[in-house]
Amino acid sequence: MATAPAFVPVQPRRTRDWAPAWRGFFGERLRNTIYGWPEPAFDVPIRTRKVLGFTIHIVTDPAALQRVMLDNKANYERPDIVRRILMPSLGNGLFSAEGEDWRKQRRIVAPTFAPGAVAAMAGLMDAAAQREIDGWPQQTTRLDFAVAATRTTMAIIADALFGGDSRLTHPAAARHIETMLAAAGQVRLTTMLGLQNIDPSLTMRRARASRAWLHATLAALVRERGAGGGADDFFGGLIRALNAQFPAEEAAALAVDNAITFYVAGHETTANALAWTAYCLAAQPELQEICRTEALATLALPASERAGAMPVLQQVFEESLRLYPPAPRWDREALAGDELAGVRITKGDIVSIWPWVIHRHRALWREPDRFDHTRFAPEAKAKLHRFQYLPFGGGPRVCVGMRFATVEALLILARWLAARRLVLPAGWQPDPAASVTLRQRVWMILREEML
Ligand code: HEM
């Protein structure tokens, strides 16, 4: 049987060498953080740059990454500058908190994301995926898959964590979140310059209004629930636990911060991952057929057992996360001196962790730009360094929703594949762009054909 030709999925333009750091604050590089990376970045274990007075080490060496995120984790916190950027949206919720505040909050939410608890939510995830498909036209059609994915993951997060509150699935909510993410590069720049109270562009003024909308919406939800938490769901449990462990005013503020954190972090990244996986499958019809056969065979199983019964689809999902990590970058700040990959780190230095670069690094992956899901077949996967593949981060601050996201994504993909064939419109390619998360500049447009 003839093998399918190698598929090298689309990526933004790279340059031959490093550009001056200031170029990152203008034009395409400001809007799109994965644009214009230099080829040498994909060869070296660490590279140090000075940006607006900050010393930033871009680390790609897995052993050094393990030191930052696990072995010497106490020395590396979310940078003060990042906390200042996040504070207006996420406050002191789980994503931005440090120290004892972080530990308490993590302990409160962890049980909701344990394997058994996620399995219990599989039914509602599958039902949301089916509802989305029921709304698709019967005939062959073009559909914006990024939008379809967002609609589905928003419905799931609302149903799973917030008692299905319809304010969280309103189309306006997706628009506000998109507006906030679009301004992320500019917000970063003004905050680094100490000008965070100034909105020099329309994009930033719109983003401020959207942040206010999001905050007001989730604050209303918290108020309506009261200190007793209302219903017996994640949100209610969170409110009750926060009130038991923090003074009332702080508990109320943390409830809003975490509601925003879980609402946004809980659907946006997964929607991203789904759209990119759909693109990778649409570009490889033979692989899509294999995954479809696998998906169809699981439909008779209870939803809670289905995700674990699609090994090839799982590998495809993992490989798509390697090539298109929905969280392409995050940072840490050194609290004291250290050494990483032979380079001296000084107190206050920023360590920049870029899955976008690590996942395509030539010292870590054979033919890194090529799609090859067999990298994640059990034997090959066992040989990977734990810190060379970081779609969900690593160490104690690993994504708390990792299992939730994986089960949800596999269930949704299974429904998509079972219902339709995914085909790329002739001559069309997506245009990957990243602000906080990895989105498509041109929405994913796929043609579907009824089976
Ligand atoms: C494919 C989907 C997802 C991806 C790729 C992803 C990625 C990540 C990454 C890389 C981090 C760590 C960032 C760092 O160390 O600075 C993180 C943290 C986090 N994620 Fe996710 N995530 C996904 C889905 C979810 C879901 C479904 C939820 C909730 C339902 C969630 C909630 C969170 C929270 C609350 C944190 C902060 C954890 C902490 O600091 O203790 N994520 N995520």
Image (cartoon, rainbow, N blue to C red):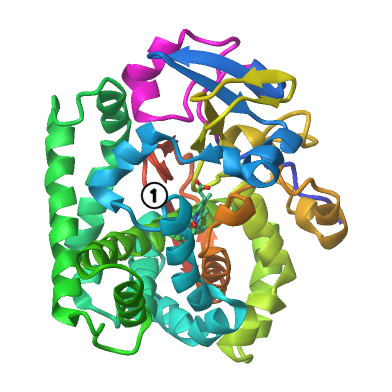
Quadrant of image for the C terminus:
bottom right
Q: Position of residue 388 (x, y in %)?
A: 71, 42
Q: Is residue 432 magenta?
A: no
Q: Is residue 151 above or below residue 229?
A: above
Instruction: Please tell me which residue is depicted at 13% across the width and 24% down the height of the picture.
Output: 200
Which of 72 and 293 lies nearest the eye of the viewer?
72
Query: Residue at point 30% right, 37% down?
Result: 84
Is 384 placed above or below 241 here?
above
Q: Which residue is mark 1?
A: 96
At x 88% / y 58%, what residue is drawn?
379
**Residue 411 horizontal side relative to residue 366, left or right:** left
Q: Is residue 158 above or below residue 348?
A: below
State left or right for residue 334 relative to residue 97.
right
Q: Is residue 30 magenta?
A: yes
Q: Nearer the viewer, residue 333 or 65?
A: 333
Which of the 4 quarters of the picture holds residue 227? bottom left
Magenta residues, dominant SS class: loop
Say if residue 379 shows up in the picture: yes
Residue appearing at x 48%, y 81% in the figure: 126
The amino acid type of the residue labelled 1 equals Ser
* Residue stretch in magenta: 11-39
